[in-house]
Amino acid sequence: MTMNELDALIHQPLRTKLVAYLAGAGELTFTELRRALDVSDGNLDAHMKKLLAAGYVSVRKETGHGRPQSFFAL
């Protein structure tokens, strides 16, 4: 794929925002992304699953005290 070709998967408004936000922030939790982009849990989850399946985003799960956290990065 060349720089002149757009990937239809990313060329969706919320996914474009997700990728851009992660590019600037590095690694964020699901909650941080949800709050920053002002979207519902279900909406964010559906879009993140597509980005994860395509290999654009990686996830790191961390357990400790309280609920497990998922950290996302490009």
Image: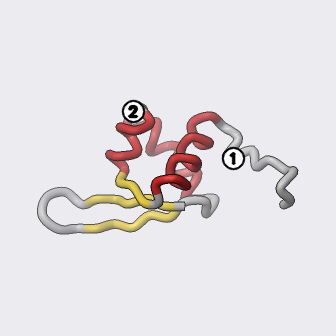
Q: Name the disc covering residue 40, or none.
A: 2
Residue 49 location (% of width, % of height): 52, 52
Residue 47 location (% of width, % of height): 53, 44
Residue at left offset 39%, top offset 67%:
60
Residue, disc 1: 9
First-in-chain label (1 vs 2)? 1
Residue at left offset 66%, top offset 37%:
12
Residue at left offset 87%, top offset 51%:
4
Q: CA distance from mark 1 to mark 2?
A: 20 Å
Which amino acid type is shown beneath numbered disc 1? Leu
Which amino acid type is shown beneath numbered disc 2? Ser
Judged from this view, the residue extending furthest toward the front is: 24
Say if mark 1 contacts mark 2, CB within 8 Å: no
On the rendered image, what quadrant is the N terminus found in? bottom right
Query: How many neighbours does mark 2 have within 10 angstroms: few (below 14), some (14-19), or many (20 or more)?
Result: few
Is 64 left, or right, of 11 in this rendering?
Answer: left
Q: Which secondary structure lies at badge 1?
A: loop
Residue 65 location (% of width, % of height): 12, 64
Residue at left offset 40%, top offset 45%:
33
Q: Nearer the viewer, residue 56 or 50?
A: 56
Relative to 71, does residue 44 appear above or below in the rendering?
above
Is 7 left, or right, of 27 in this rendering?
Answer: right
